[in-house]
Image (cartoon, grey):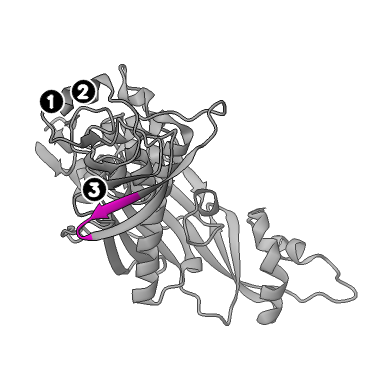
Amino acid sequence: MFDIPTLMNPPISHRLRIRSGGKEFEIVVDERRSLLENLLKAGIMVDNLCGGRGICGKCAVKVISGSFSPPTDRELRWMKVLKPGMRLSCQVRVLSDAVIELEEVSREIEGKILTWGAVKGLTINPLVKVMKVKLKPPSLQDQKSDLERLLGSLNVKSYDPLIIADLSDALRKSNFEVNVVSYENEIIDVIPINENSRFFGVAVDIGTTTVVAYLYDLISGENLGVESAYNKQIRFGEDVISRVNYARSNRSNLEDLRKAVVDTINELLENLARKTGARKDRIYDAVCAGNTTMLSFLMGNNCYHGSRAPYPPPFTSSVKVKARDLGIEMNPRGYVRTVPSMSMYVGGDIVADILASGLHECERAAALVDLGTNGEIVIRTSEGEFLATSC
């Protein structure tokens, strides 16, 4: 397992020189952490199928010079079959300035990601609503505050306090005629009527290996673009269990995982905005589907207890969080929400599959198969019962 730094064990840093593919570069490593953790935190891709438990042997590196911690029992077993000078990076700590050699490293993974498919007809009914409002300007006889004036003209009484910062200027830029953007009856933006008023939402599929984001016009329902990328969490483990083990080691590791998927989503939003001309501050709704573990990581839960019998998930209902609280680069007053899950191992991705495929509307027995990093099968019986399993 990964070492857990403590306050009683202050950081000791060393310089680590890495040779790879005919090139050399240097990083600073923390002696308290395993070599693998240090490499991953530096953004260097290292195979670690077992999540740093010393089982798979994939993270072996060649030691050229320097002082390293003694082999653990698990590493000793591997050293019988590894070439001389090879160490398991998940089991060893760097104790001095050192030099190691890696196979050619990459910060990116290449491949093709499926981003299209058949879509059944949908009726657009977004939670984001836009209302055109014409207010009476203030006068010496009517000195109500701008916020009171706005709320008095609407049935909506709830508002995000951050709208106050730009409210006065927005009202006066268009002679008190504005578009008021609300989310489930909460005012989240006020835009001058004479500004370009397109409003967007994104649907995000957070897979264990890949992440795909679709941009939609919330008024017309038009799909404006799609972008995909490999989930940046891959460098912390290629499967769910490996990442759970990594996250459990310490709070910093969990934040690494959370930030990795947030960074992936933000990269996709940036690409969508650049290619379509959409303003990111006009994205008000982000709906995220994914397996229960991926959604838990997004919300900052390490999902450890869900990985042990009796497998209780951290949450199954749809959760909504302000974009600013997660660090998602869209309108900060907008919301990021999750598709509800059914259980620890039948997640929001399967719920989304069922809705998108229309399986719930099928009148005869039918099956849905989702083959990804993890596999799931859902069967709808002719009696309308749903049976689901995952592996």
Q: Which residue is mark 1?
A: 80
In the image: residue 191, left or right of residue 23: right
Q: Position of residue 291 (x, y in %)?
A: 29, 39
Q: Which numbered disc flags the more N-terminal residue, 1 or 3?
A: 1
The verdict on residue 19 being magenta is yes
Q: Give coordinates of residue 127: x percent, y percent.
A: 46, 55
- What residue is disc 3 on? 101
Q: Is residue 116 left or right of residue 166?
A: left
Instruction: Name the spot of residue 390 as percent of width and height, x first.
Output: 18, 31
Q: Are marks 2 and 1 in contact (CB under 8 Å)?
A: yes
> Residue 299, image x and y in percent?
45, 40
Q: Residues within 10 Å of mark 3 (few under 14, many from 20)?
A: some
| Residue lying at 37% horizontally and 54% vertically, measured from the top left | 26
Which quadrant, please, contains the N terminus? Answer: top left
Q: Which residues are magenta?
A: 17-22
Residue 231 seen in render: no
Decide which of 9, 361 is in the foreground and name it.
Answer: 9
Assess whether residue 360 is covered by the magenta stretch: no
Mark 1: few/some/many CA within 10 Å (<14, 14-19, 20+): few
| Numbered marks: total | 3
At a point 27% along the width and 41% down the height, the residue shown is: 351
- Residue type at mark 3 is Glu
Are there few (<14), some (14-19), or many (20+) residues within 10 Å of tag 2? some
Q: Which residue is mark 2?
A: 76
Earlier sequence position, callout 2 versus callout 3: 2
At label 1, which amino acid type do we have?
Lys
